[in-house]
Image (tube, coloured by chain):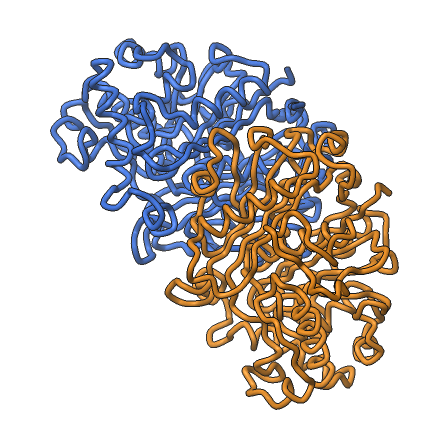
Chain colours: A orange, B blue
Amino acid sequence: MSVNLRNKVAVIGGGLIRFGELYDKSFGDMMSEAYLNCLDSIDKGIDPKEINAAWYGTVRGPATGSIAGTLLGLGGIPITRIENACATGSDTFRNACFAVAAGLYDVALVVGCEKMLDRPGGLIGLDRSGPRYFDMFALTMPSAFGVYGTRHMHVFGTERKHFAMIAVKNHYYGKMNPLSHFRREITVEQVLDAPIISWPMGLYDCCPVTDGAAAVIICREELTTKYTDSPVYVLGSGLAVQPTRLGLRNDFTSMMPAVWAAQQAYKMGKVGPDDIDFAEVHDCFTCTELIQYEDLGFCKKGEAKTFVENQEMYIGGKHPVNVSGGLKSHGHPIGTTGVAQIVELFWQLRNEAGGSPKGAGGLAVSDPSGKRQIPNAEIGLQQNIGGAGPQVSCINILSNKKR
Amino acid sequence: MSVNLRNKVAVIGGGLIRFGELYDKSFGDMMSEAYLNCLDSIDKGIDPKEINAAWYGTVRGPATGSIAGTLLGLGGIPITRIENACATGSDTFRNACFAVAAGLYDVALVVGCEKMLDRPGGLIGLDRSGPRYFDMFALTMPSAFGVYGTRHMHVFGTERKHFAMIAVKNHYYGKMNPLSHFRREITVEQVLDAPIISWPMGLYDCCPVTDGAAAVIICREELTTKYTDSPVYVLGSGLAVQPTRLGLRNDFTSMMPAVWAAQQAYKMGKVGPDDIDFAEVHDCFTCTELIQYEDLGFCKKGEAKTFVENQEMYIGGKHPVNVSGGLKSHGHPIGTTGVAQIVELFWQLRNEAGGSPKGAGGLAVSDPSGKRQIPNAEIGLQQNIGGAGPQVSCINILSNKKR
């Protein structure tokens, strides 16, 4: 199989809105704001008419590309909607890259939007995510992911404090990021003392329910100089699914879709885990992030607890992870999250994450300390994993240089 | 903008199940049956392990690629779910083609599945299709499309009998097709005398609510000989959206997304309407099919009534349309429909529609007369249009020769 997305597609703009409980904004308000921020972020400017096609990711929002087009004032162009559980945002980006890499379009918009809080049901309608068909009755998301945490503790001696240290780290960075949903630090003791939601996940091990929107604009790599002198290139991409029935699995210490998607993305990008300067990883629960350290190859299998104890996932460590604040603190508006991670990569790879990049709508993305910027970052990875229990994972690897 | 999907992707297999009120089959039963029929249809055989990736289209089914993978026994590969209203099936096919054309995958599966009848609500949940955001309160699908029929009658003197003649034609062919939901002929008088659903659309002007599934397998064109000596090539593809607010439109005699998508597809395929030997057109309502004759360029604007009176849309006429029976008689399981149209094109272009192609699961697709096969068909077009009022249209053009 030939694999040639590599170096063919560039991100030229990224826009994000402040995440949170956005009762004061409609779905259209949120999406338009992210889109307009994204247009503003393009260094040499862009006329919206130059956008040839769009891909739109949402799980709970209006179901079709035409409605996204209406909300954004884009008509006459192709707009496809993608939905793939919590990997919706990154898979939306991925499909847009395919069409641009195939030469179909010069410039494409990728937009993710999710209004989680002012709709009945609160969380994603689980009836369409699995239980109608499978063995998940009575399973909630914390329990579907928690079984992995429990097993990892049993097999490798991981403790709840290791999960807690991840929550502490993500709040530490989230506090620095003015776009975050939660902006306060927490302690390991607070995490351990919080009420248990589903063992071993306590309240502070779980990401919040967040509203948010994000947008990026990509183009064929030959055209980048028209728009910016600092493009960010797509190196690799991977997506894999695993059959959903938990009872058929014989290992709960790895999340196999992530392992498989990482293999694909590393192979396509001709890079390995050691080349990854930083990552935005899907920390829907702290145990998810911990296990992903191993699944993505940032440390050896079973050694995540040491990785955590040595603070290798902080800036200055081997593999800084979720210095945006992650899903845990920055927030997790489902279909938006992957696109927002790509915007964070875009800013980090352009050395803009310590200040006020244009795509942030006039806000800073670091507090005045500016310590969120990873020094000399050249390659970043973003990853989503979703489904009730890990069932799909999508990974994209970006770099500020062609490789 | 370069446009190079043309001649790069080939359909090598197509599978369909008998459409209807399939209360006796689960969603997984239907999808698996279409998939297995599709595997059977590949002349030189295929190992499912050769499928590198899949795209899955549904509007009301389980929401993610991972569940489709579970139902089909496909794990470890990328599976993306697409939803784009009634254009879901054809847009699912289109996105799979992008990835194959970009060289990412050798072989990809495209599957559409929709269970319309045994779920609460009956039809698609309109809350996610528009009215929450727009001016469509109290509009139903027959009324949203019916306004186009009314306007066409007013401007061009089209009469209800012309719409009726389309229903008669589609039932005429649908009766011949053992895979159809409805298998009986009707008369113009019956159509005109039936209860009005929303003027000018009566009961027999509206397509039924149907369960069904369809699957096709595509590959990079260089690899076709491994699988078949009779591949069908993708020539062109187009997709366009129109803002959804009906009140902002100044013309209801054309469905602009179809006009725009056709322009894209013809340009990419380097063909024009006169080159189209036959078409599967989105006849959700008879007025939709009639207006599409003009929008797709099969006749001049305003002349569809003459086109209909001269039976140019029958086999033997200029542009045979919906000789499968169309949505009206063959059925319209929303996310399946576009994929099913591609299977019909596959059979017609391989001269198999008069008999029992392998992808039909042992059934014939023509009654013993075999008159459904279009003689010497070389280029076929399939088209979907969707949304509450035409808001998105997707078109794919296929041929049994590279051009």
- Residue closest to the eye, B206 or A111: A111
Query: Residue at the spot x=62%, y=36% of the render?
Result: A108
Q: Say which of A121 and A268 sits in front.
A: A121
* Quadrant that contains the N terminus of chain B: top right
Q: Is residue A317 visible?
A: yes
Q: Is residue B383 above or below residue A295?
A: above
x, y percentage for residue B70? Answer: 57, 58
Q: Which x, y percent locates residue B263?
A: 50, 19
Residue B9 can be seen, yes or no: no
Query: In the image, what residue occupies the spot 67% across and 59% down?
Result: A365
Locate residue A312: give its quadrant: bottom right
Percent from the top left, x then y, of residue B270? Answer: 59, 14
On the rendered image, what quadrant is the C terminus of chain B found in? top right
Residue that lies at the very extreme toward the front in this rendered image: A368
> Would residue B185 appear left or right of A186 to someone viewing this image?
left
Dividing the picture into quadrants, the one containing residue A47 is top right
Residue in the foreground of this view, choosing between A210 and B357: A210
In the rendered structure, the answer to whether residue B332 lies left or right of residue B214 reads: left
- Describe residue A7's horizontal placement relative to residue B129 as left or right: right
Query: Does A375 sit left or right of B362 as displayed?
Result: right
Q: Residue at x 59, y 47 (%)?
A: A215
Please give the name of the residue rendered at 37% of the width and 28% of the height, measured from the top-left corner. Answer: B367
x, y percent for residue A265: 77, 51
